[in-house]
Image: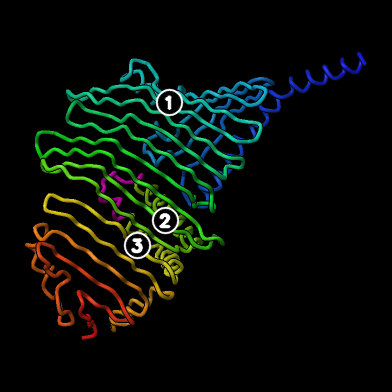
Amino acid sequence: MKKLLIVLICLAVVCAAGLPIANGIIMERTIKSAIEENNNRAAKTGTDFRIKILEYDRGLFSSRVKWCIENPGGFRGKDMAQIVLVNQGTHGFFSVNSQTSLEENPWYMQWVNTHLNGKDPLSIRTRFSLAGTMGSKIHMNAFSIEGKGKTVDFHTLDLDISTGNGFETLDTKGRWEGLSQGGEFVMGPVTFSSDLYQLTDIIWAGENTISLEQLKINDGKSDPVNLSGLTFNFNTSASEDKTTVTMVMDFHVDSIELGGKPLSDWAGTFTVKQIDTASFEQGMALYSGIMTQAGRRFEKTSGNPGDFQKILKDEMARNTPQLMSALNGLLKKGLGIEISGLDIELPEGKLTGSLDLTLKKDLDPSNVLAFAMQPDTMFSYFNLDAQLNMPYALAGGIPNLTRPLFPGMATGFFIIKDDLLSLDMHIKEDKLFLNGNQVVLNQ
Protein backbone atom coordinates (compact mmCIF):
# COMPACT_ATOMS: atom_id res chain seq x y z
CA MET A 1 0.00 0.00 0.00
CA LYS A 2 2.80 2.40 0.88
CA LYS A 3 4.57 1.71 -2.43
CA LEU A 4 1.34 2.30 -4.33
CA LEU A 5 0.83 5.61 -2.52
CA ILE A 6 4.38 6.69 -3.39
CA VAL A 7 3.83 5.76 -7.04
CA LEU A 8 0.56 7.75 -7.13
CA ILE A 9 2.25 10.76 -5.55
CA CYS A 10 5.07 10.56 -8.08
CA LEU A 11 2.58 10.34 -10.93
CA ALA A 12 0.68 13.36 -9.58
CA VAL A 13 3.92 15.35 -9.32
CA VAL A 14 4.94 14.41 -12.85
CA CYS A 15 1.50 15.30 -14.23
CA ALA A 16 1.42 18.58 -12.34
CA ALA A 17 4.89 19.46 -13.59
CA GLY A 18 3.81 18.58 -17.11
CA LEU A 19 0.80 20.90 -17.14
CA PRO A 20 2.82 24.11 -17.62
CA ILE A 21 4.72 22.45 -20.46
CA ALA A 22 1.44 21.33 -22.05
CA ASN A 23 0.03 24.84 -21.70
CA GLY A 24 3.08 26.24 -23.46
CA ILE A 25 2.42 23.88 -26.37
CA ILE A 26 -1.25 24.91 -26.42
CA MET A 27 -0.26 28.58 -26.44
CA GLU A 28 2.01 28.03 -29.44
CA ARG A 29 -0.68 26.15 -31.33
CA THR A 30 -3.29 28.82 -30.50
CA ILE A 31 -1.10 31.68 -31.68
CA LYS A 32 -0.04 29.92 -34.88
CA SER A 33 -3.62 28.89 -35.61
CA ALA A 34 -4.83 32.48 -35.16
CA ILE A 35 -2.15 33.79 -37.49
CA GLU A 36 -2.92 31.16 -40.14
CA GLU A 37 -6.64 31.95 -39.89
CA ASN A 38 -6.01 35.67 -40.33
CA ASN A 39 -3.65 35.23 -43.28
CA ASN A 40 -6.03 32.83 -45.03
CA ARG A 41 -8.84 35.36 -44.63
CA ALA A 42 -6.60 38.16 -45.89
CA ALA A 43 -5.70 36.12 -48.96
CA LYS A 44 -9.38 35.54 -49.75
CA THR A 45 -10.21 39.24 -49.47
CA GLY A 46 -7.08 40.39 -51.33
CA THR A 47 -5.85 42.62 -48.48
CA ASP A 48 -2.27 43.27 -47.39
CA PHE A 49 -3.01 42.76 -43.68
CA ARG A 50 -0.66 39.91 -42.78
CA ILE A 51 0.71 38.58 -39.50
CA LYS A 52 4.13 36.94 -39.29
CA ILE A 53 6.04 35.24 -36.48
CA LEU A 54 9.57 36.62 -36.31
CA GLU A 55 10.81 34.60 -33.32
CA TYR A 56 9.25 31.87 -31.18
CA ASP A 57 11.22 30.71 -28.16
CA ARG A 58 9.19 28.19 -26.15
CA GLY A 59 10.79 27.00 -22.94
CA LEU A 60 9.50 24.58 -20.34
CA PHE A 61 7.86 27.17 -18.12
CA SER A 62 7.90 30.36 -20.22
CA SER A 63 7.71 31.51 -23.82
CA ARG A 64 8.82 34.58 -25.71
CA VAL A 65 7.15 35.37 -29.02
CA LYS A 66 8.08 38.17 -31.37
CA TRP A 67 5.61 38.75 -34.19
CA CYS A 68 4.51 41.54 -36.46
CA ILE A 69 1.48 42.93 -38.27
CA GLU A 70 2.45 43.96 -41.79
CA ASN A 71 0.87 46.97 -43.52
CA PRO A 72 -1.50 47.81 -40.64
CA GLY A 73 -4.29 49.91 -42.12
CA GLY A 74 -2.26 50.61 -45.25
CA PHE A 75 0.01 53.16 -43.58
CA ARG A 76 2.51 54.80 -45.88
CA GLY A 77 6.20 55.00 -45.03
CA LYS A 78 8.72 52.48 -43.86
CA ASP A 79 8.41 53.43 -40.18
CA MET A 80 4.78 52.30 -40.13
CA ALA A 81 5.12 49.41 -42.56
CA GLN A 82 4.65 47.01 -39.65
CA ILE A 83 3.80 46.82 -35.95
CA VAL A 84 6.08 44.56 -33.92
CA LEU A 85 4.70 42.92 -30.79
CA VAL A 86 6.57 40.93 -28.18
CA ASN A 87 4.72 38.45 -25.96
CA GLN A 88 6.33 37.20 -22.76
CA GLY A 89 4.30 34.28 -21.39
CA THR A 90 4.45 32.34 -18.14
CA HIS A 91 3.20 28.74 -18.25
CA GLY A 92 0.84 27.98 -15.37
CA PHE A 93 -0.96 24.81 -14.35
CA PHE A 94 -4.23 25.70 -16.09
CA SER A 95 -3.30 28.49 -18.48
CA VAL A 96 -0.56 30.70 -19.89
CA ASN A 97 -0.52 34.35 -18.88
CA SER A 98 1.18 36.64 -21.36
CA GLN A 99 2.20 40.31 -21.39
CA THR A 100 2.45 42.10 -24.77
CA SER A 101 4.80 45.00 -25.44
CA LEU A 102 5.24 47.49 -28.30
CA GLU A 103 8.70 48.50 -27.15
CA GLU A 104 10.43 47.20 -30.31
CA ASN A 105 8.64 49.76 -32.50
CA PRO A 106 10.94 52.81 -32.82
CA TRP A 107 8.13 55.04 -34.06
CA TYR A 108 5.98 54.13 -31.04
CA MET A 109 8.72 54.53 -28.45
CA GLN A 110 9.74 57.85 -29.99
CA TRP A 111 6.16 59.06 -29.62
CA VAL A 112 6.03 57.83 -26.00
CA ASN A 113 9.35 59.48 -25.16
CA THR A 114 8.51 62.73 -26.93
CA HIS A 115 4.92 63.27 -25.83
CA LEU A 116 4.49 61.15 -22.68
CA ASN A 117 7.87 61.53 -20.95
CA GLY A 118 8.68 57.86 -21.60
CA LYS A 119 5.58 56.52 -19.80
CA ASP A 120 3.95 53.88 -21.99
CA PRO A 121 0.17 54.15 -21.40
CA LEU A 122 -0.66 50.77 -22.93
CA SER A 123 -0.95 47.42 -21.17
CA ILE A 124 -2.00 44.18 -22.90
CA ARG A 125 -2.44 40.96 -20.94
CA THR A 126 -3.57 37.70 -22.55
CA ARG A 127 -4.62 34.36 -21.08
CA PHE A 128 -4.40 31.13 -23.12
CA SER A 129 -6.40 28.28 -21.55
CA LEU A 130 -6.16 24.51 -21.77
CA ALA A 131 -9.49 24.50 -23.63
CA GLY A 132 -7.93 26.45 -26.51
CA THR A 133 -9.76 29.70 -25.74
CA MET A 134 -8.02 33.05 -25.50
CA GLY A 135 -8.84 36.23 -23.60
CA SER A 136 -7.08 39.60 -23.67
CA LYS A 137 -7.39 42.62 -21.38
CA ILE A 138 -6.22 45.91 -22.88
CA HIS A 139 -5.81 48.96 -20.66
CA MET A 140 -4.72 52.45 -21.68
CA ASN A 141 -3.88 55.02 -19.03
CA ALA A 142 -5.01 58.60 -19.46
CA PHE A 143 -2.55 60.97 -21.15
CA SER A 144 -2.48 64.46 -22.67
CA ILE A 145 -0.97 65.87 -25.86
CA GLU A 146 -0.02 69.52 -26.31
CA GLY A 147 -0.13 71.15 -29.72
CA LYS A 148 -0.66 74.64 -31.16
CA GLY A 149 -1.35 76.09 -27.75
CA LYS A 150 -4.09 73.58 -26.93
CA THR A 151 -4.21 70.46 -24.81
CA VAL A 152 -6.14 67.33 -25.80
CA ASP A 153 -6.84 64.93 -22.93
CA PHE A 154 -7.25 61.24 -23.76
CA HIS A 155 -8.97 59.38 -20.95
CA THR A 156 -8.62 55.77 -19.84
CA LEU A 157 -9.65 52.80 -21.96
CA ASP A 158 -10.47 49.24 -20.85
CA LEU A 159 -11.20 46.52 -23.38
CA ASP A 160 -11.81 42.79 -22.88
CA ILE A 161 -11.61 40.47 -25.89
CA SER A 162 -12.22 36.72 -25.81
CA THR A 163 -12.35 34.06 -28.51
CA GLY A 164 -13.76 30.58 -28.46
CA ASN A 165 -12.00 27.38 -29.40
CA GLY A 166 -11.11 27.55 -33.08
CA PHE A 167 -11.69 31.31 -33.20
CA GLU A 168 -15.26 30.80 -34.33
CA THR A 169 -16.64 33.21 -31.73
CA LEU A 170 -15.57 36.70 -30.68
CA ASP A 171 -16.80 38.58 -27.62
CA THR A 172 -15.73 42.12 -26.73
CA LYS A 173 -16.65 44.48 -23.94
CA GLY A 174 -15.10 47.85 -23.31
CA ARG A 175 -15.35 51.35 -21.95
CA TRP A 176 -13.44 54.42 -23.05
CA GLU A 177 -13.77 57.49 -20.89
CA GLY A 178 -13.39 59.59 -24.03
CA LEU A 179 -11.38 62.68 -24.86
CA SER A 180 -11.72 66.41 -24.33
CA GLN A 181 -10.20 69.73 -25.28
CA GLY A 182 -11.05 72.14 -22.52
CA GLY A 183 -14.69 73.16 -22.74
CA GLU A 184 -14.66 73.36 -26.54
CA PHE A 185 -14.97 69.64 -27.17
CA VAL A 186 -16.02 66.84 -24.80
CA MET A 187 -16.77 63.29 -25.94
CA GLY A 188 -17.49 60.29 -23.76
CA PRO A 189 -17.65 58.02 -21.98
CA VAL A 190 -18.14 55.44 -24.73
CA THR A 191 -19.16 51.84 -23.98
CA PHE A 192 -19.18 49.05 -26.54
CA SER A 193 -19.80 45.32 -26.70
CA SER A 194 -20.12 42.55 -29.25
CA ASP A 195 -21.15 38.91 -29.29
CA LEU A 196 -20.21 37.47 -32.68
CA TYR A 197 -19.79 34.13 -34.41
CA GLN A 198 -18.14 33.37 -37.74
CA LEU A 199 -20.81 32.69 -40.34
CA THR A 200 -18.44 32.41 -43.32
CA ASP A 201 -14.76 33.09 -43.96
CA ILE A 202 -15.55 36.82 -44.15
CA ILE A 203 -18.98 37.41 -42.61
CA TRP A 204 -19.48 37.57 -38.84
CA ALA A 205 -23.00 37.42 -37.41
CA GLY A 206 -24.23 38.51 -34.01
CA GLU A 207 -24.78 41.68 -32.03
CA ASN A 208 -22.80 44.90 -31.61
CA THR A 209 -23.71 47.81 -29.35
CA ILE A 210 -22.04 51.18 -28.91
CA SER A 211 -23.21 53.96 -26.60
CA LEU A 212 -21.99 57.53 -26.22
CA GLU A 213 -23.00 59.27 -23.00
CA GLN A 214 -22.17 62.81 -24.06
CA LEU A 215 -20.92 64.92 -26.95
CA LYS A 216 -20.44 68.67 -26.45
CA ILE A 217 -19.12 71.04 -29.11
CA ASN A 218 -18.79 74.74 -28.34
CA ASP A 219 -16.04 76.47 -30.29
CA GLY A 220 -17.58 79.94 -29.95
CA LYS A 221 -17.92 80.26 -33.74
CA SER A 222 -21.21 78.43 -34.31
CA ASP A 223 -24.23 77.25 -32.35
CA PRO A 224 -23.19 74.81 -29.61
CA VAL A 225 -24.21 71.16 -29.83
CA ASN A 226 -24.98 69.12 -26.74
CA LEU A 227 -25.93 65.47 -27.22
CA SER A 228 -26.46 62.78 -24.61
CA GLY A 229 -27.50 59.16 -24.53
CA LEU A 230 -26.70 58.08 -28.09
CA THR A 231 -26.95 54.32 -28.64
CA PHE A 232 -26.41 52.26 -31.80
CA ASN A 233 -27.30 48.57 -32.01
CA PHE A 234 -26.11 46.47 -34.96
CA ASN A 235 -27.39 42.94 -35.47
CA THR A 236 -26.57 40.47 -38.25
CA SER A 237 -28.52 37.23 -38.32
CA ALA A 238 -28.65 34.33 -40.75
CA SER A 239 -31.52 32.21 -42.01
CA GLU A 240 -31.69 28.65 -40.75
CA ASP A 241 -29.95 27.34 -43.87
CA LYS A 242 -27.47 30.27 -43.80
CA THR A 243 -28.23 31.19 -47.42
CA THR A 244 -29.40 34.71 -46.51
CA VAL A 245 -28.50 37.26 -43.87
CA THR A 246 -30.45 40.18 -42.41
CA MET A 247 -28.76 43.27 -41.00
CA VAL A 248 -30.54 45.58 -38.56
CA MET A 249 -29.29 48.88 -37.19
CA ASP A 250 -31.28 50.96 -34.73
CA PHE A 251 -30.39 54.15 -32.92
CA HIS A 252 -31.75 56.25 -30.07
CA VAL A 253 -30.77 59.64 -28.70
CA ASP A 254 -32.02 60.63 -25.25
CA SER A 255 -31.58 64.37 -25.80
CA ILE A 256 -29.89 66.80 -28.15
CA GLU A 257 -29.64 70.57 -28.13
CA LEU A 258 -29.50 72.34 -31.48
CA GLY A 259 -29.53 76.11 -31.87
CA GLY A 260 -30.26 76.54 -28.21
CA LYS A 261 -33.44 74.43 -28.32
CA PRO A 262 -33.54 71.19 -26.29
CA LEU A 263 -34.93 68.18 -28.15
CA SER A 264 -35.38 64.56 -27.11
CA ASP A 265 -35.98 60.96 -28.09
CA TRP A 266 -34.62 60.62 -31.61
CA ALA A 267 -35.07 57.06 -32.84
CA GLY A 268 -35.16 54.88 -35.93
CA THR A 269 -34.43 51.40 -37.27
CA PHE A 270 -32.79 50.56 -40.61
CA THR A 271 -32.96 46.99 -41.96
CA VAL A 272 -31.53 45.25 -45.02
CA LYS A 273 -33.25 41.88 -45.21
CA GLN A 274 -32.64 38.58 -46.98
CA ILE A 275 -29.23 39.37 -48.45
CA ASP A 276 -27.86 36.44 -50.43
CA THR A 277 -24.96 35.22 -48.28
CA ALA A 278 -22.67 33.95 -51.06
CA SER A 279 -23.10 37.09 -53.18
CA PHE A 280 -22.63 39.34 -50.18
CA GLU A 281 -19.39 37.57 -49.32
CA GLN A 282 -18.29 37.84 -52.96
CA GLY A 283 -19.03 41.57 -52.93
CA MET A 284 -17.16 42.13 -49.67
CA ALA A 285 -14.10 40.29 -50.97
CA LEU A 286 -14.24 42.17 -54.25
CA TYR A 287 -14.57 45.56 -52.55
CA SER A 288 -11.67 44.75 -50.23
CA GLY A 289 -9.51 43.70 -53.16
CA ILE A 290 -10.36 46.85 -55.13
CA MET A 291 -9.49 49.10 -52.20
CA THR A 292 -6.23 47.22 -51.60
CA GLN A 293 -5.14 47.51 -55.23
CA ALA A 294 -6.09 51.19 -55.28
CA GLY A 295 -4.08 51.75 -52.10
CA ARG A 296 -1.01 50.03 -53.57
CA ARG A 297 -1.18 52.20 -56.67
CA PHE A 298 -1.79 55.34 -54.62
CA GLU A 299 1.38 54.73 -52.59
CA LYS A 300 3.38 55.18 -55.80
CA THR A 301 1.86 58.60 -56.57
CA SER A 302 2.42 62.09 -55.17
CA GLY A 303 -0.23 61.51 -52.51
CA ASN A 304 -2.77 63.95 -53.97
CA PRO A 305 -6.34 62.88 -52.94
CA GLY A 306 -7.43 63.48 -56.52
CA ASP A 307 -5.02 60.73 -57.62
CA PHE A 308 -6.74 58.24 -55.34
CA GLN A 309 -10.18 59.09 -56.72
CA LYS A 310 -8.95 58.51 -60.28
CA ILE A 311 -7.20 55.27 -59.32
CA LEU A 312 -10.29 54.00 -57.52
CA LYS A 313 -12.46 54.83 -60.51
CA ASP A 314 -10.06 52.90 -62.76
CA GLU A 315 -10.11 49.89 -60.44
CA MET A 316 -13.91 49.91 -60.33
CA ALA A 317 -14.04 50.01 -64.14
CA ARG A 318 -11.50 47.20 -64.41
CA ASN A 319 -13.62 45.03 -62.09
CA THR A 320 -16.98 45.90 -63.66
CA PRO A 321 -17.79 42.29 -64.77
CA GLN A 322 -17.14 40.94 -61.27
CA LEU A 323 -19.12 43.79 -59.68
CA MET A 324 -22.07 43.12 -61.97
CA SER A 325 -21.89 39.42 -61.13
CA ALA A 326 -22.02 40.17 -57.41
CA LEU A 327 -24.88 42.65 -57.92
CA ASN A 328 -26.81 40.12 -59.97
CA GLY A 329 -26.45 37.62 -57.14
CA LEU A 330 -27.70 40.13 -54.58
CA LEU A 331 -30.84 41.20 -56.47
CA LYS A 332 -32.82 38.11 -55.50
CA LYS A 333 -36.46 37.76 -54.54
CA GLY A 334 -36.98 38.83 -50.92
CA LEU A 335 -34.14 41.34 -50.76
CA GLY A 336 -35.47 44.42 -49.10
CA ILE A 337 -34.80 47.70 -47.32
CA GLU A 338 -36.91 48.75 -44.39
CA ILE A 339 -36.95 51.92 -42.29
CA SER A 340 -39.23 51.89 -39.28
CA GLY A 341 -39.88 53.94 -36.19
CA LEU A 342 -38.24 57.05 -37.64
CA ASP A 343 -38.99 59.81 -35.14
CA ILE A 344 -36.79 62.90 -35.10
CA GLU A 345 -37.69 66.12 -33.33
CA LEU A 346 -36.27 69.26 -34.93
CA PRO A 347 -36.53 72.94 -33.95
CA GLU A 348 -39.08 73.32 -36.77
CA GLY A 349 -41.15 70.32 -35.64
CA LYS A 350 -41.18 66.52 -35.75
CA LEU A 351 -40.08 64.32 -38.68
CA THR A 352 -41.60 60.83 -38.86
CA GLY A 353 -41.64 58.16 -41.51
CA SER A 354 -41.30 54.56 -42.63
CA LEU A 355 -40.24 52.62 -45.73
CA ASP A 356 -40.61 49.02 -46.86
CA LEU A 357 -39.16 48.20 -50.31
CA THR A 358 -38.85 44.52 -51.28
CA LEU A 359 -38.08 42.61 -54.46
CA LYS A 360 -41.01 40.40 -55.52
CA LYS A 361 -38.83 38.43 -57.97
CA ASP A 362 -35.23 38.17 -59.10
CA LEU A 363 -33.98 41.28 -60.87
CA ASP A 364 -31.25 41.18 -63.49
CA PRO A 365 -29.26 44.44 -63.74
CA SER A 366 -29.77 44.32 -67.50
CA ASN A 367 -33.48 44.98 -66.86
CA VAL A 368 -32.57 48.60 -66.17
CA LEU A 369 -32.37 49.14 -69.94
CA ALA A 370 -35.94 47.87 -70.31
CA PHE A 371 -37.06 50.16 -67.47
CA ALA A 372 -35.62 53.12 -69.37
CA MET A 373 -37.86 52.28 -72.34
CA GLN A 374 -40.96 51.33 -70.32
CA PRO A 375 -40.59 52.69 -66.77
CA ASP A 376 -43.92 51.35 -65.53
CA THR A 377 -42.68 47.77 -65.95
CA MET A 378 -40.40 48.18 -62.92
CA PHE A 379 -43.43 48.22 -60.60
CA SER A 380 -43.98 44.50 -61.21
CA TYR A 381 -40.67 43.79 -59.50
CA PHE A 382 -41.25 45.61 -56.22
CA ASN A 383 -43.45 45.87 -53.17
CA LEU A 384 -43.36 49.42 -51.80
CA ASP A 385 -44.94 51.17 -48.86
CA ALA A 386 -43.52 54.54 -47.80
CA GLN A 387 -44.68 57.43 -45.65
CA LEU A 388 -42.86 60.59 -44.60
CA ASN A 389 -44.09 63.62 -42.70
CA MET A 390 -41.89 66.62 -42.01
CA PRO A 391 -42.43 70.19 -40.83
CA TYR A 392 -43.41 72.59 -43.61
CA ALA A 393 -41.02 75.13 -42.11
CA LEU A 394 -38.12 72.73 -42.74
CA ALA A 395 -38.42 72.53 -46.54
CA GLY A 396 -41.51 74.49 -47.56
CA GLY A 397 -39.38 76.91 -49.53
CA ILE A 398 -38.47 74.24 -52.10
CA PRO A 399 -41.27 74.39 -54.70
CA ASN A 400 -40.29 71.20 -56.55
CA LEU A 401 -41.31 69.18 -53.50
CA THR A 402 -44.99 70.05 -53.92
CA ARG A 403 -45.23 70.46 -57.72
CA PRO A 404 -45.66 67.62 -60.25
CA LEU A 405 -42.36 67.07 -62.01
CA PHE A 406 -43.83 65.40 -65.14
CA PRO A 407 -47.30 64.85 -66.68
CA GLY A 408 -47.80 61.43 -65.10
CA MET A 409 -47.89 62.94 -61.59
CA ALA A 410 -51.11 64.42 -60.18
CA THR A 411 -49.26 65.94 -57.19
CA GLY A 412 -45.72 66.66 -56.16
CA PHE A 413 -43.83 64.19 -54.04
CA PHE A 414 -45.27 65.99 -51.02
CA ILE A 415 -48.64 67.52 -50.33
CA ILE A 416 -49.34 70.12 -47.64
CA LYS A 417 -51.36 68.95 -44.64
CA ASP A 418 -51.77 71.62 -41.98
CA ASP A 419 -48.18 72.56 -41.08
CA LEU A 420 -46.65 69.38 -42.52
CA LEU A 421 -45.26 68.19 -45.83
CA SER A 422 -46.64 64.67 -46.29
CA LEU A 423 -45.65 61.83 -48.64
CA ASP A 424 -47.59 58.58 -49.08
CA MET A 425 -46.26 56.22 -51.77
CA HIS A 426 -47.02 52.56 -52.41
CA ILE A 427 -47.22 49.96 -55.17
CA LYS A 428 -50.46 48.05 -55.58
CA GLU A 429 -51.26 45.56 -58.35
CA ASP A 430 -48.05 46.55 -60.16
CA LYS A 431 -49.05 50.24 -60.16
CA LEU A 432 -47.44 53.14 -58.32
CA PHE A 433 -49.62 55.44 -56.22
CA LEU A 434 -48.45 58.76 -54.81
CA ASN A 435 -50.58 60.61 -52.29
CA GLY A 436 -53.67 58.68 -53.41
CA ASN A 437 -53.15 59.15 -57.15
CA GLN A 438 -51.68 56.75 -59.69
CA VAL A 439 -48.36 57.77 -61.22
CA VAL A 440 -48.00 56.92 -64.93
CA LEU A 441 -44.42 56.94 -66.20
CA ASN A 442 -45.00 55.61 -69.75
CA GLN A 443 -45.85 58.97 -71.29
Which is more N-terminal, label 2 or label 1?
1
Q: Marks 1 and 2: which is nearer the front?
A: 2
Which is more N-terminal, label 2 or label 3?
2
Quadrant (top left/top right/bottom left/bottom right) for the N terminus: top right
Which is more N-terminal, label 3 or label 1?
1
Q: Residue at x 90, y 18 (%)?
A: 4
Residue 47: give x, y in percent of width and height: 46, 48
**Residue 302 is covered by the magenta coloring:** yes
Residues in magenta? 299-311
Residue 346: give x, y in percent of width and height: 16, 51
Image-based side of 56 in relation to 220, left or right: right
Residue to which mark 3 is pinned: 338
The answer to which image quadrant residue 368 occupies is bottom left
Secondary structure state at the residue bearing disc 1: strand
Name the residue nearer the viewer: 283 or 252: 252
Q: For the residue marked with disc 3, what is the amino acid? A: Glu
Residue 373: give x, y in percent of width and height: 28, 83
Residue to which mark 2 is pinned: 247
Residue to which mark 1 is pinned: 139
Is residue 184 depicted above or below 334 in this figure?
A: above
Image-based side of 91 in relation to 147, left or right: right
